[in-house]
Image: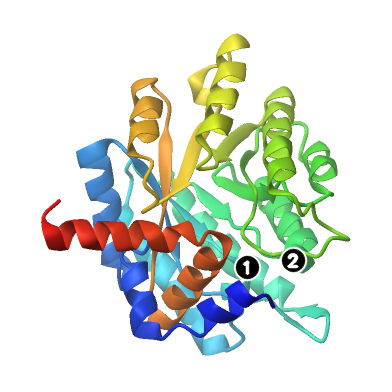
Amino acid sequence: MGFKEVMINSMPSPLVKVFARPYVAGQGVDSGIDTAKRLYHEKRLYSTIDLLGEEIKEKDEIEKNVQIYYELIEKLGKQEFASISLKPTQLGVYRENGIIYGEDFCYENIKGIVERANAYSIHVTIDMENHPFTDLTLRIFKALRDEFENVGTVLQSRLYRTKKDILELPANKMCKIRTCIGIYKEPPEVAIQDKRKMKEKLFEYMVLLIERGHYPEIATHDEKLIERCIEYLDKNNIPKERYEFQMLMGVPRDKMQRKIIERGNIMRLYVPFAEKWKYAIAYCKRRLAANPMMGAYVIKNLFGKTTGR
């Protein structure tokens, strides 16, 4: 663990809570829904709502998480502004001594959520976690995609395997795939270490997904990369219904988000909420480690509010 990670992990939880404010909707299902509604009605921003939490082994908590997703779906109902995201390790799988357990249990839990969401035409994204879970996540996704249209997943441009994973997506079914760099620090034997190369691969994989008939959800805050994607998509007359852009809630990209919306594209934000604040704190520490500028944004915003700027 590097010095940066040590410093961030040693931050007291109350301080991390301050940093979490722009990036976490709040506590409870209603906080996620209310935030998603506000973003859509005030700014025409779409959302993907996510319950924070991962690496959960306790069966009672896993079953409670399933019920929280059921509640989220029922309260959202049929609408156009929000999808949902979930993680396999909050819904039944875990890794111990290099062995992964609970795949069947996790599959049934996610299937129940996807099935309920399908009744309301709510899309579900199965998030991608660190590389030991990639094969499992893709197996669950492909099995569910055989039966349901309202399910997608995530592929990370930092992993060497990603091109092969795109080529092995179902050829006869359009798949919604969030393509992103990925937040998890991966070892050099499985992942690119240079962020510039990760971004180059993200563009390459976006093109490949389009060429293969899939729907890329282009998840990046890099404005030059977004402009490059837009140039390619426009030059090749790709309909705006064939792709969308995604960002994290709280990252200051208002001008670019407005540009994307004014073009007629979907601009979707990741809107996480917590039932337990320890998961929100873990999420924010990981984001701070990946992007220390996140802390500077928060301090700037707090300073501006205090001084009236």
Residue 302 as seen in the image, left or right of residue 166:
left
- What x and y, as percent, mark residue 168? 83, 41
Q: Does the residue at mark 1 contact the one at mark 2 (Cβ under 8 Å)?
A: yes
Q: Which residue is mark 2?
A: 133
Q: Could you give the CA–CA distance between mark 1 and mark 2, rounded to whole angstroms?
A: 8 Å
Residue 88 as seen in the image, left or right of residue 188:
left
Q: Residues within 10 Å of mark 2 (few under 14, many from 20)?
A: some
| 46 or 288, nearer to the observer | 288
The label number, if any, that marks residue 3 in the structure image: none
Element at label 2: helix
Q: Amino acid at mark 1?
A: Pro
- Name of the residue lying farthest toward the right: 189
The label number, if any, that marks residue 88 in the structure image: 1
- What x and y, as percent, mark residue 174? 65, 33
- What x and y, as percent, mark residue 137? 71, 60
Q: Amino acid at mark 2?
A: Phe
Q: Looking at the image, which residue is at 34% across and 22% down?
A: 262
Which of the 4 image quarters holds residue 4? bottom right
